[in-house]
Image (tube, rainbow, N blue to C red):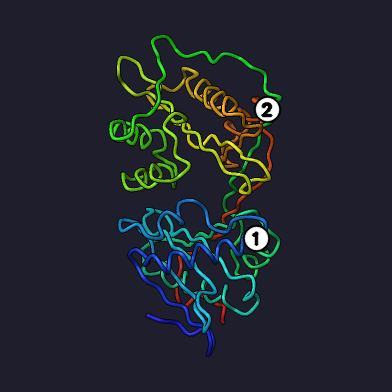
Amino acid sequence: MVDEVSTRVVVSGTAGPLTADTAASVRALAERAAAADGVAPLSEQPLLWLTEPEAPVIHLRAEGPDGLVGYAQLDVGSQSSVRAELVVDPAHRRAGVGRALLARAHAEAASVRDRTLRVWAHGDLPPARAFAEDAGMPVVRELLQMRLDLTARPVVAPVLPPGVTVRAFVPGHDEDAWRRVNSRAFAHHPEQGRMTSADLRAREAEPWFDPAGFLLAERDGILLGSVWTKVHPAGEHGDHPVGEIYVVGVDPDAQGLGLGRALTALGLDHLAARGLATAILYTGAENTVAVHTYERAGFVRSAVDVMFGSDTKSSPAGVTMGA
């Protein structure tokens, strides 16, 4: 199915993995947008899903005579909504490409029963706010980035619950146990709780993956929780490499023991031992308990991603934006 945006640009939608060449074009488009906006338009998961055969996504491509000028990815695997991320080439903005991609996204979301469309905008840039307001899509969720100066962090030995030991993740051995605990810890999380074996393997294949920074907490050989760290190279979050508390998860049966706090401290210790001066993490603004906990640990809010949407079910007839 192909929708005409103008006589020179068309929007097409496909399921299944993109070819290597098309995926490379999407990454190049995202890099051009990041250079122009100062923030990456696509998060990690959509980039990993570009060529993943098992990914529950629809790829929307806006193409003109010179190639790809816009892209949107729709996550149709959620039980409550269709989540999208969208990017338009800086040289082709304000020409209807974004509106056409969004209109097609509404139409695709309407084909999935009882789903509403949600669109992430990274960095909460004013043009994105204006675009969403024009589309009648208010902010429905905020994801905070929080930052910590590791050089000013007091050194305090983490206190583990009695009988709990910590070791590094072993690739090829610990995947199933980790996914079981992760799915229990994030049972109500719209993204993290859905991580599949393919998603985990894709991250293990990434250049940044380091099992030494993926710490598992066990008692009597039973996994109770983990902290997974990540190091971003210089240029992604500033002029210097930046560490990230990527995922902290504790099995519900082990909550209330202070394990999450201890694991976070161990993750920060690992990042500091690598010589990093800064650590970041992401948490939902609605999770006030977590936000206050991180603030007490010295984290400050440094950026925000916003999700736009509405409570109205998507309907092709209800899309009012033209090309």
Name the outermost residue toward the top: 162
Report the front residue among 288 and 64. 64
Query: Mark 2 = which residue?
Result: 298
Q: Residue at x 37, y 23 (%)?
A: 224
Q: Position of residue 24 (x, y in %)?
A: 46, 64
- Quadrant including the N terminus: bottom left
- The three-letter amino acid code for the residue at tag 2 is Gly
Q: Residues within 10 Å of mark 1 (few under 14, many from 20)?
A: few
Q: Residues within 10 Å of mark 2 (few under 14, many from 20)?
A: some
Q: Residue at x 66, y 28 (%)?
A: 150
Q: Which mark identifies residue 35?
A: 1
- The three-letter amino acid code for the residue at tag 1 is Ala
Q: Residue at x 35, y 31 (%)?
A: 181
* SS assignment at label 1: helix
Give the image quarter of residue 128.
Answer: bottom right
Between marks 2 and 1 in the image, the one whose residue lies nearer the viewer: 1
Q: Earlier in the sequence, mark 2 or mark 1?
A: 1
Q: Are marks 2 and 1 in contact (CB under 8 Å)?
A: no
Is residue 153 rendered to the left or right of residue 58?
right
Q: Residue at x 43, y 26 (%)?
A: 215
Q: Position of residue 53 (x, y in %)?
A: 31, 58
Q: Position of residue 42 (x, y in %)?
A: 53, 57
